[in-house]
């Protein structure tokens, strides 16, 4: 957490070095889907929709009329889950530990209509503090439904590091409302570079004695879709304008 605080402090200092331009503070609310990859010798596994909700506090600093940088703090869960396709409703989704994400984004604005509606492409790098997700865990799963059955064993392990980096690619529409507020609708895709969670599974289906092997892993990838609101902070710089009076003496 100390390291994360230093990164956020450095980012904020960088942002406020452009204090002659507008500074915005805002809130984002979004829904997401965590993304996993599955390798399966039996082709019987798939992912359910791994839905989650996030909120974020943002700080944006304009560099010029069409270019800005932004940071903040986003809170989310890492969600994981599995479904065995022979059984309807089998498996499910589980929440991992809560994560903190600190972004540093470069934002450009394309004027669409009278400087009140903008198309906004975004690219950024995010410091993703997901922790070790509880280390290694072991478990089993058995279910029978009608004439079908699944028996499985699995092992889940965390990645080598507690913190990771994610590439962010985004696109949003921004609307100037009430002459000051910025309302936005956005979609983002987050891309990781190394595995942060892996689950290895051995399972059998029905009375077939063959043991299938599978693996499910994520690099922290997810997409989110949401809305945000931003308000400009008013910075006032005061100067000493006191007048000096020169008196004439005889």
Image (cartoon, rainbow, N blue to C red):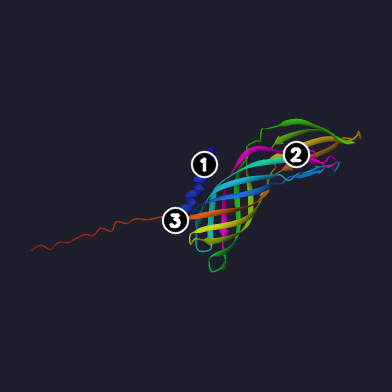
Residue assigned mark 2: 92
Q: Residues within 10 Å of mark 2 (few under 14, many from 20)?
A: some
Label 3 vs 2, first from the N-terminus: 3
Q: In this picture, which residue range is highlighted in magenta?
A: 83-109
207 left or right of 163 in image: right
Q: Nearer the viewer, mark 3 or mark 2?
A: 2
Identify which residue is drawn at 14% across, 61% down: 247
Residue 89: percent from the left, percent from the top?
79, 40
Label 1 vs 3, first from the N-terminus: 1
Residue 118: percent from the left, percent from the top?
57, 63
Location of the C terminus by quadrant is bottom left
As helix, strand or loop, the secondary structure at mark 1 comes to: helix
As helix, strand or loop, the secondary structure at mark 3 comes to: loop
Residue 218: percent from the left, percent from the top?
71, 43
Query: What numbered label is drawn on residue 5?
Result: 1
Residue 19: percent from the left, percent from the top?
44, 56
Q: Are marks 2 and 1 in contact (CB under 8 Å)?
A: no
Q: Is residue 243 above or below residue 35?
A: below
Location of the N terminus by quadrant is top right
Residue assigned mark 3: 19
Residue 91 within the magenta-colored segment of the rendering: yes
Identify which residue is drawn at 78% across, 33% down: 154
Residue at far left of view: 250
The reply to whether residue 160 is in sight is no
């Amino acid at each position: 957490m100390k390291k994360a605080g230093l990164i956020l402090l450095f980012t904020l200092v960088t942002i406020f070095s452009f204090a002659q331009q507008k500074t915005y503070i805002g809130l984002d609310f979004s829904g997401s889907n965590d993304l996993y990859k599955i390798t399966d010798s039996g082709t019987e596994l798939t992912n359910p929709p791994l839905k989650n909700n996030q909120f974020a506090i943002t700080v944006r600093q304009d560099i010029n009329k069409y270019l800005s940088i932004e940071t903040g703090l986003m809170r989310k869960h890492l969600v994981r889950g599995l479904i065995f396709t022979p059984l309807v409703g089998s498996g499910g989704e589980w929440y991992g530990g809560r994560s903190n994400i600190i972004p540093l984004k470069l934002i450009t604005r394309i004027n669409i209509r009278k400087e009140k509606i903008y198309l906004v492409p975004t690219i950024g790098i995010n410091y993703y503090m997901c922790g070790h997700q509880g280390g290694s865990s072991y478990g089993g799963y058995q279910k029978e439904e009608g004439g079908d059955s699944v028996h499985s064993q699995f092992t889940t392990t965390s990645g080598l590091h507690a913190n990771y980096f994610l590439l962010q690619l985004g696109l949003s529409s921004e609307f100037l409302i009430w002459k000051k507020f910025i309302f936005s609708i956005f979609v983002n895709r987050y891309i990781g570079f190394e595995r942060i969670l892996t689950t290895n599974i051995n399972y059998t289906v029905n009375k077939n004695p063959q043991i299938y092997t599978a693996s499910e892993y994520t690099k922290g990838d997810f997409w989110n879709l949401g809305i945000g609101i931003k308000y400009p902070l008013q910075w006032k710089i005061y100067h000493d304008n006191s007048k000096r009076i020169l008196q004439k003496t005889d």
